[in-house]
Amino acid sequence: MKGNIVLASRSPRRLELLARIGVTADVRPADIDESPRPGESPPATALRLAEAKARSVRADDHVVLAADTIVSVADQQLGKPTDDDDASRMLRLLAGRTHEVTTAVAVLDGGRVRTQLSTTHVRFRQLTDDEVGWYVASGEWRDKAGAYALQGRAAAFVESIHGSHTNVIGLPLDIVVHLLRDAGCTLLAPDHDGPPTLAGRGEDEA
């Protein structure tokens, strides 16, 4: 029987989301270049990076779960802000507009990688300069694609969301459950207590 799931991310938000569905994971952050390639679409970037993250921490006796989230608006990909000014710029770009949050999830099981995309449309209301300054001063934007956290103070900026809420936080749980089950993990079972297991598979199976 294979061991626990490995999460190829240092994001505490993703770890917390997994805990909601009873999944414990060993954290092994991926160390890759997350820069988009010229002309690459947000879905293509997310899929490429999620798979690269999974492969970079490959563990033969574990299932590896990786994800990459990209915020895009007006054909611009918004990664993680570099400083206060960059965070302010991103928030002003999002204000009064609808943007897309795209997350690719990758599950590596032996030599096989399963991937799937989730896209959510989020609309921000208009923001005042004071509101932007208030949010940037909070520091909540740090290490967040698009410079905001839906589960935090930025919830006050959101007019509407169409799609998965957990996708916006960084890990679409519906897709995670589907991919992990496809890899053989036992999840969300009423008679299952403890970390996910790979049901019905022996040590010598890929």
Image: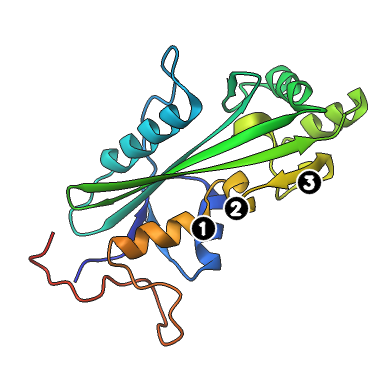
- Residue 25 horizontal side relative to residue 163, left or right: left
Cα–Cα gap, marks 3 and 1: 19 Å
Q: Earlier in the sequence, mark 3 or mark 2?
A: 3
Crowd tier of the residue under label 1, counting other residues whose Cα lies within 10 Å: few below 14, some 14–19, many 20 or above: many
Q: Which mark is residue 173?
A: 1
SS at mark 2 in the image: helix
- Percent across and percent down for residue 202 are 13, 72
What's the residue at 11%, 68% (across, down)? Answer: 203
- Vertical side of 11 occupied by 135: above or below: above
Which picture quadrant has residue 33? top left
Q: Amino acid at mark 3?
A: Ala
Nearest the camera: 58 or 43?
Answer: 43
Left/right placement of residue 9 relative to residue 89 reads left
Q: Amino acid at mark 1?
A: Leu
Q: Quadrant of residue 37?
A: top left
Is residue 182 something one can see in this rendering? yes
Task: Give me the C-alpha separation between circle 1 and circle 2.
Answer: 6 Å
In the picture, the quarter occupied by the N terminus is bottom left
* SS under mark 1: helix
Q: Earlier in the sequence, mark 3 or mark 1?
A: 3
Mark 2 residue type: Thr
- Mark positioned earlier in the residue sequence (1 or 2): 2
Q: Position of residue 71 (x, y in %)?
A: 60, 31
Give the residue furthest to the top. Answer: 38
Residue at which label 2 appears: 166
Judging depth in this view, the residue of 68 and 42 nearest the camera is: 42
- How would you rate the neighbour count of disc 3 (Cα within 10 Å): few for under 14, some for 14-19, many for 20 or more? few
Label 3, label 2: how far apart the Cα atoms are: 13 Å
Residue located beneath label 3 in the image: 155
